[in-house]
C-alpha cells in the first residue's frame, strides 16, 4: 500500500451516493433527435464536416478538431442532419452555441470501424492519433482533450488515474468500475504504454467505494496473471471533498504540490479520469469513438435514480424521463455535482461528453440558502480551503475590487471547489465573488495586452516615419547638388554668352552632354549614399536568419502558453477562457506566418544573391522592394531636379523670375489649403502651417518685386540665349 | 420548462451565524453560574439590563439604517455583546452604568462602523473601557465573594431585594465590596508573596489564586473548551494568549519576593484571564484572519495583559490589551498569510504585491 498524504482543508458534505447505486448501469432508448454542441471540450470548437440533409452513420465523424487543442465530434447514432444552428448548450451561463442536430432513423447502424487488442505493437503516436480521432476528452467534468494531455514534453514517471469521484451524489465512475473493471484496466495499460511505461501507475479512490475498489483489485490480480502489464496500484484514501481535484489528488498520492501556474507534467505526472480510460479502451480496442457515456441521474425529484449509459447529445428531458423525474418537485436542475455543477436553464439541453451527473433535488432535500449576512471573519472558510487561501480576505478584496490585493492573496490559485461557500455560516456566495473577480482580472489583463500591442504598433510607425524622413533627406540633398551644378553651369554659360553670344547656341548640345556626365556623377553619388544605408546581402541574410529564429521561439512560446491555458483542468469552461484560447491560437497563427515570411525572404535572398552581386558592380542594385522603390523615387526626383535646372539654365532671368513666382504662388495656394484643412480639423499643426503660409507670402512678395525690377530693366533686351532655346 | 438558476455550490453546510452566536451564549453559562454563586445575583442583573439595552439600541439603529430589524436581531450578535459586557462589569453595578456601556458598545463601537462584521474594535471591550475611564469608582467596586472571612466574620452578599435596590438606586454597594485579588496583590509592597497570601483573606482562604476568582476562571475555561470542541474557533488565539501571559509571568516571577509579579497560576486564574482568552480574544471580527496570525495576536494580548497588570495603573487590563491588539490585527494579517498550495513560501501580502 502506497503512502498517502493529507490535503489542507476539505469538507464532508452528506454523500448521498446510495440512492443511485441500486441498479446496474441502464440503457436509454434512442431519442428522436440528438443535439451535438460543437464545443463540448476545452479548446477550439470543432468544425462541421456535414451539412443539413446529410445522412450520417453511427460513429461517423461529423465535426473535425480545429487546431491542436480541440476534439472531433461523431454521430452517436445513424440518421439525418436536420439542423446546424445555435442552441442552448449546457454551460453555467445558459448561453447558446452552434450545434449539429441529428434526427435519428432508429436503425442505429454503425459506420465501418475496427480496433486492435494488440495495442502494444502500435507506437505512442499512432495510439494518440486514434484517441484524438475518437474525440476523447476528460470525462471527469472539465472536458480537456485527452490526446493533448498524453503528449507532454517532460518524461512521465507517474500515471495517476482519478477514481475519486469526490462530489456528493455522483456514482457514474463507481458503477463503471464495478461493472467494467477489466476494460478499465486495459485502458490504463494503453495509457501507460503511450506514456512510455511510467514507474508508477496509481488509481486513487476514496474509501467510500469499497465495492469498486474490491472489483478493481480482483481484476488487477487476474490481469497481472494474464499479461505482462505495468504494476498498477489501487490507492485508497479517506473520503473528503475535494480530494478529486487534480492538484489535490496529486498531493494525496505523491505528497507533491503542482507549482502555481504549472502543469502536473512538470512533476512528471499525468492524471486521467477513470471514465476516460474506459473510453480509451473502447476507442483503441473496438475502434469506437466517444459517442456515449455513463451519467448519474439522481436526487429526490427522481423516482428511479440510477446510472445510465446515454448517447452524447441526448436531450436532458429524455434521460430524465427514464429516471421518472418529477419536475414539480424540482426547483432547480443541476448538471454536475452539488458542489461544482451548474444549473440548467431548461431540460432541452443535451448531455455532453463531460456530463457526469444530473442532479434533481427537491426543495426539502436542498433548501435554498438563507439570505447572506455580513462576514464575521470566523475563518471556517480558511480552515476548509484546499488551496490554503484566506477566502474571507479574498471576499473582502473582491467586494472592494482591489485586484492587486486579490492577486497578492493568490486568487488565481482558487480552484472554485466551493468548500468555503459550503461552510460559510453567513451564507455568503464566496465562489461567485471569486469567479466575478477572476473574470474582471482577465478582462483587465486582456485590455493591458491590447494597449501594449497598440503601443508597439505606434513605435513601429514612428520608426517607419523616421526612415522615410531619412530617405527624403537623401533626395533633398541630391536635388540640392543638382541645382548647384546647374547654377554653376548657367553662370559659366552666361559668362560665355556675354563673351560670345553665338557660341552659346552652338554649345548647348555639347554642353548638355558634359552637364549630363557631370550630373550623372552626382546621381551616382546620391544613389550610392542611399544604397549605403541599405544592408549588404550578407547582412540581410543574417537579419532574416535572426528573424526566423525569433519567430520560431515566439511560436514555441505561444504554443506553450496555449497548452498551459488548455491544461488547467480546474478552470471552468467559460467563454472568457475559450476566447483566451482563441486569442492564443491567433497569436500562434500570426507567429507562424511571420516565421514563414522570414523563411521565404531568406530563400529569395539566396536565389537573388548572385545576380545582386553581379549588379552591384555596375549600379547599386536592391533586393527588397521597399529599397528599390526608394532608389527609384530618388532617381525620379533627381531627374526632375535636373530637368528643372536645365530649364532654368536656359531661361531668361525674367522668365526665371516669372516661373519662380508661379511656383511660389502654387506653393502658397497649397500651403493655404493645408492650413485651412488643419484649421477645420483642429490639428496641432496649425501654427506650423500658418508660419509656412506667412513665409511663402513674404517670398512671393520678394519675387514679385524682383520681377517688376527685372521687367523694367530687361524687357527691352531679350536674352538671345533664351530666344534660341525657345526656338529650338 | 423554466428552471431556477443559482451558482455553485448548491449544497450548504448546517452552520449559521446564529448557531455560532448561540454556542457562545451557551458557553458562558458555567462562568455565569460560578460568578453568581460567589458574587450574588449581580451578574445576572447586569446581563438582563445589558441585553434589553443592546436589543433596543440595535433595533433603533437598524431602523435608522433602514435595515430589516427582525432579520438582524435574530443573528444574536447584539445579545452576545450584551452578555459579555454584563459578565465583565462588576456585579451590582448601577443600572445606568450598564446601560451607558452597552449603548456605547452597540451604537458607537458596532453600528457607526457598519454593524456586524465591520467593527474594528471589540464592542464589549469598548463599552468596558469607556466605563472604566469615565466611572472608575463604580467600575472598581467588586462585591466580596460569598464566604470570605474577614476578621472572623463571614461576608454575606446582599439578598435579592437589596441587590435590586442597589442596582436601581445606584448606592449601597459599598457595604459589600472588597478588593479583588489582583487589586490586593497590586497593593502589596512590603511582604513576601507567601506572607502576603497568609495575611490576605482572599488568598488564605483560596486554593490557588484568590477566593471565587479561581473558580470563575476555571468555569470560563470549561466554556471555552466546549467552544473549541464544537469548533466554533481554533485554539490559536486563546492558547496564544495564555502562553504569552504564562511566559511573561514565568520570566518575571522571582520565587516570591515582595517585588514579585505573581506566579503563572496566579495570573492564569485571576481576573478576566480565561474569560478573555475564550470569549474576547476569540472574537473573529476584530482579530486576525490566519491561524498563524491568531497565535501571534493572542500571544501579544497575553504579553500586554501582563505588562499592564504588573507595571501599569490598572489591576486588570484585558480590555486595553485587546483593544491595542485590535489596532494591530490588520498589520499582523499582512505578515502572516498561509502558504498557498503550489507556492514556495508564504511571504507577506506586501511582498507578494511587490513581486507582481
Image (cartoon, helix red, strand yellow):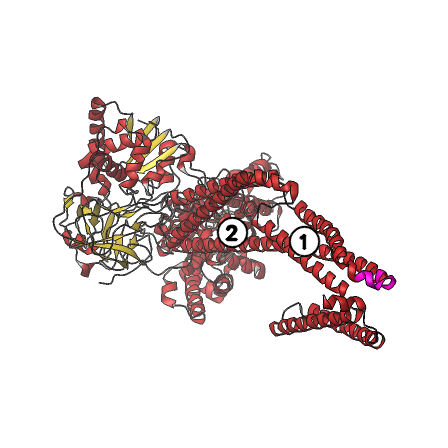
Residue closest to the far left = A107
Q: State which quarter of the image contains the N terminus of chain B.
A: bottom left
Q: A227 left or right of A591?
A: left
Q: Position of residue A246 (x, y in %)?
A: 36, 40
Q: Earlier in the sequence, mark 2 or mark 1?
A: 2
Q: Which residues are magenta?
A: A496-504
> Which chain is mark 2 on?
A
Closest to the observer: A711 or B345? A711
The part of the image, by quadrant, that contains residue B61 is bottom left
Q: A19 left or right of B71?
A: left
Q: Position of residue A575 (x, y in %)?
A: 37, 54
Q: A540 left or right of B15?
A: right
Closest to the observer: B8 or A612? A612
Q: Position of residue A455 (x, y in %)?
A: 57, 55
The part of the image, by quadrant, that contains residue A482 is bottom right
Q: Residues within 10 Å of mark 1 (few under 14, many from 20)?
A: some
Residue A117 falls within the magenta-colored stretch: no
Closest to the observer: A715 or A557? A715
Query: Are the two marked residues, 2 and 1, in contact with CB atoms closer than 8 angstroms?
Result: no
Identity of the residue drawn at 66% across and 46% down: A531
* Foreground label between 2 and 1: 1
Tally of numbered tags = 2
> Which chain is mark 1 on?
A
Can residue B199 be seen?
A: yes
Instruction: Give the residue number, with chain letter if any, for mark 2.
Output: A405
Amino acid at each position: 500500500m502506497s503512502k498517502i498524504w493529507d490535503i489542507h482543508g476539505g469538507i464532508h458534505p452528506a454523500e448521498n451516493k446510495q440512492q443511485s447505486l441500486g441498479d446496474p448501469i441502464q440503457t436509454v432508448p434512442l431519442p428522436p433527435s440528438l443535439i451535438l454542441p460543437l464545443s463540448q471540450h476545452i479548446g477550439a470548437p470543432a468544425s462541421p464536416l456535414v451539412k443539413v440533409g446529410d445522412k450520417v452513420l453511427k460513429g461517423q465523424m461529423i465535426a473535425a478538431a480545429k487546431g491542436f487543442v480541440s476534439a472531433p465530434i461523431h454521430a452517436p447514432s445513424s440518421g439525418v442532419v436536420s439542423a446546424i444552428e445555435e442552441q442552448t448548450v449546457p454551460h453555467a451561463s445558459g448561453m447558446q452555441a452552434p450545434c449539429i442536430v441529428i434526427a435519428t432513423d432508429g436503425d442505429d447502424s454503425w459506420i465501418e470501424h475496427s480496433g486492435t487488442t494488440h495495442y502494444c505493437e502500435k507506437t505512442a503516436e499512432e495510439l494518440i492519433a486514434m484517441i484524438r480521432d475518437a474525440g476523447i476528452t476528460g470525462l471527469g467534468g472539465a472536458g480537456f482533450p485527452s490526446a493533448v494531455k498524453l503528449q507532454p514534453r517532460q518524461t512521465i514517471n507517474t500515471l495517476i488515474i482519478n477514481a475519486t469521484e469526490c462530489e456528493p451524489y455522483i456514482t457514474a465512475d463507481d458503477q463503471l468500475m464495478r461493472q467494467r473493471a477489466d476494460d478499465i484496466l486495459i485502458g490504463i495499460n494503453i495509457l501507460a504504454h503511450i506514456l512510455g511505461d511510467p514507474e508508477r501507475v496509481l488509481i486513487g479512490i476514496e474509501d467510500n467505494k469499497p465495492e469498486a475498489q474490491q472489483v478493481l483489485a480482483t481484476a488487477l490480480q487476474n490481469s497481472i496473471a494474464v499479461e505482462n502489464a505495468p504494476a498498477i496500484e489501487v490507492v485508497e484514501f479517506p473520503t473528503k471533498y475535494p480530494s478529486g481535484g487534480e492538484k489535490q489528488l496529486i498531493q494525496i498520492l505523491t505528497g507533491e504540490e503542482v507549482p502555481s501556474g504549472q502543469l502536473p507534467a512538470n512533476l512528471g505526472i499525468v492524471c486521467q479520469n477513470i471514465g476516460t480510460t474506459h473510453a480509451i479502451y473502447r476507442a483503441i480496442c473496438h475502434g469506437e469513438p466517444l459517442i456515449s457515456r455513463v451519467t448519474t441521474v439522481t436526487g429526490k425529484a427522481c423516482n428511479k435514480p440510477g446510472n445510465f449509459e446515454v448517447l452524447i447529445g441526448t436531450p436532458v428531458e429524455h434521460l430524465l424521463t427514464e429516471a421518472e423525474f418529477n419536475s414539480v418537485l424540482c426547483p432547480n436542475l443541476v448538471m454536475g455535482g452539488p458542489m461544482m455543477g451548474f444549473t440548467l436553464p431548461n431540460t432541452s439541453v443535451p448531455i455532453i461528453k463531460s456530463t457526469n451527473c444530473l442532479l434533481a433535488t427537491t426543495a426539502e432535500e436542498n433548501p435554498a440558502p438563507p439570505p447572506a449576512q455580513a462576514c464575521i471573519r470566523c475563518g471556517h472558510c480558511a480552515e476548509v480551503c484546499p488551496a490554503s487561501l484566506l477566502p474571507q480576505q479574498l471576499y473582502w478584496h473582491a467586494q472592494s475590487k482591489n485586484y492587486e490585493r486579490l492577486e497578492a492573496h493568490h486568487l488565481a490559485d482558487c480552484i472554485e471547489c466551493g468548500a468555503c461557500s459550503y461552510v460559510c455560516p453567513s451564507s455568503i456566495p464566496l465562489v461567485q465573488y471569486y469567479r466575478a473577480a477572476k473574470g474582471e482580472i482577465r478582462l483587465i489583463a486582456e485590455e493591458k495586452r491590447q494597449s501594449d500591442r497598440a503601443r508597439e504598433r505606434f513605435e513601429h510607425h514612428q520608426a517607419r516615419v523616421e526612415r522615410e524622413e531619412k530617405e527624403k533627406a537623401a533626395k533633398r540633398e541630391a536635388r540640392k547638388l543638382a541645382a548647384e551644378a546647374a547654377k554653376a553651369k548657367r553662370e559659366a554659360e552666361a559668362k560665355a554668352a556675354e563673351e560670345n553670344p553665338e557660341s552659346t547656341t552652338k554649345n548647348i548640345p555639347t554642353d548638355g552632354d558634359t552637364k549630363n556626365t557631370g550630373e550623372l556623377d552626382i546621381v551616382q553619388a546620391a544613389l550610392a549614399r542611399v544604397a549605403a544605408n541599405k544592408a549588404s546581402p550578407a547582412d540581410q541574410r543574417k537579419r532574416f536568419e535572426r528573424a526566423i529564429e525569433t519567430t520560431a521561439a515566439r511560436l514555441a512560446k505561444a504554443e506553450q502558453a496555449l497548452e498551459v491555458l488548455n491544461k488547467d483542468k480546474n478552470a471552468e469552461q467559460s467563454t472568457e477562457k475559450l476566447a483566451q484560447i482563441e486569442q492564443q491560437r491567433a497569436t500562434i497563427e500570426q507567429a507562424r506566418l511571420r516565421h514563414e515570411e522570414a523563411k521565404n525572404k531568406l530563400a529569395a535572398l539566396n536565389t537573388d544573391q548572385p545576380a545582386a552581386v553581379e549588379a552591384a558592380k555596375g549600379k547599386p542594385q536592391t533586393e527588397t522592394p521597399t529599397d528599390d522603390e526608394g532608389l527609384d523615387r530618388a532617381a525620379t526626383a533627381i531627374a526632375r531636379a535636373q530637368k528643372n535646372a536645365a530649364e532654368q539654365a536656359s531661361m531668361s532671368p525674367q522668365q526665371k523670375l516669372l516661373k519662380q513666382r508661379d511656383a511660389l504662388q502654387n506653393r502658397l495656394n497649397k500651403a493655404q489649403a493645408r492650413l485651412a484643412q488643419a484649421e477645420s480639423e483642429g490639428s496641432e499643426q496649425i501654427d506650423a502651417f500658418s508660419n509656412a503660409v506667412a513665409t511663402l507670402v513674404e517670398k512671393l512678395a520678394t519675387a514679385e518685386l524682383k520681377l517688376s525690377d527685372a521687367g523694367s530693366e530687361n524687357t527691352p533686351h531679350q536674352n538671345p540665349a533664351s530666344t534660341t532655346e525657345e526656338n529650338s | 420548462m423554466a428552471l431556477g438558476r443559482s451558482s455553485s455550490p448548491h449544497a450548504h453546510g448546517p452552520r449559521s451565524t446564529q448557531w455560532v452566536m448561540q454556542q457562545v451564549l451557551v458557553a458562558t453559562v458555567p462562568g455565569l453560574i460560578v460568578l453568581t454563586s460567589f458574587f450574588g445575583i449581580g451578574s445576572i442583573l447586569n446581563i438582563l439590563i445589558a441585553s434589553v439595552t443592546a436589543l433596543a439600541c440595535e433595533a433603533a439603529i437598524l431602523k435608522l439604517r433602514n435595515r430589516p430589524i427582525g432579520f438582524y436581531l435574530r443573528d444574536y450578535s447584539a445579545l452576545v455583546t450584551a452578555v459579555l459586557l454584563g459578565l465583565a462589569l462588576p456585579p451590582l453595578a448601577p443600572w445606568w452604568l450598564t446601560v451607558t456601556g452597552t449603548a456605547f458598545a452597540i451604537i458607537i463601537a458596532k453600528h457607526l462602523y457598519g454593524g456586524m462584521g465591520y467593527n474594528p474594535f471589540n464592542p464589549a471591550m469598548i463599552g468596558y473601557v469607556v466605563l472604566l475611564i469615565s466611572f472608575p469608582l463604580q467600575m472598581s467596586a467588586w462585591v466580596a465573594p460569598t464566604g470570605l472571612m474577614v476578621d472572623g466574620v463571614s461576608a454575606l452578599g446582599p439578598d435579592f431585594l437589596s441587590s435590586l435596590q442597589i442596582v436601581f438606586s445606584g448606592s449601597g454597594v459599598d457595604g459589600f465590596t472588597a478588593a479583588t485579588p489582583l487589586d490586593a496583590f497590586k497593593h502589596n509592597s512590603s511582604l513576601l508573596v507567601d506572607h502576603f497570601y497568609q495575611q490576605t483573606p482572599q488568598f488564605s482562604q483560596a486554593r490557588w489564586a484568590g477566593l471565587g476568582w479561581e473558580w470563575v476562571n476555571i468555569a470560563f475555561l470549561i466554556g471555552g473548551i466546549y467552544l473549541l470542541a464544537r469548533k466554533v474557533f481554533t485554539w490559536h488565539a486563546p492558547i496564544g494568549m495564555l502562553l504569552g501571559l504564562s511566559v511573561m509571568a514565568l520570566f518575571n516571577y522571582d520565587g516570591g519576593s515582595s517585588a514579585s509579579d505573581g506566579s503563572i497560576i496566579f495570573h492564569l486564574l485571576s481576573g478576566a484571564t480565561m474569560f478573555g482568552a475564550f470569549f474576547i480574544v476569540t472574537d473573529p471580527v476584530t482579530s486576525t484572519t490566519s491561524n498563524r496570525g491568531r497565535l501571534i495576536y493572542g500571544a501579544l494580548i497575553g504579553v500586554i495583559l501582563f505588562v499592564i497588570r504588573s507595571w501599569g495603573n490598572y489591576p486588570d487590563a484585558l480590555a486595553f490589551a485587546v483593544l491595542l491588539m485590535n489596532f494591530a490585527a490588520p498589520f499582523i494579517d499582512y505578515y502572516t498569510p498561509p502558504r498557498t498550495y503550489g507556492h514556495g513560501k508564504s511571504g507577506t501580502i506586501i511582498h507578494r504585491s511587490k513581486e507582481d
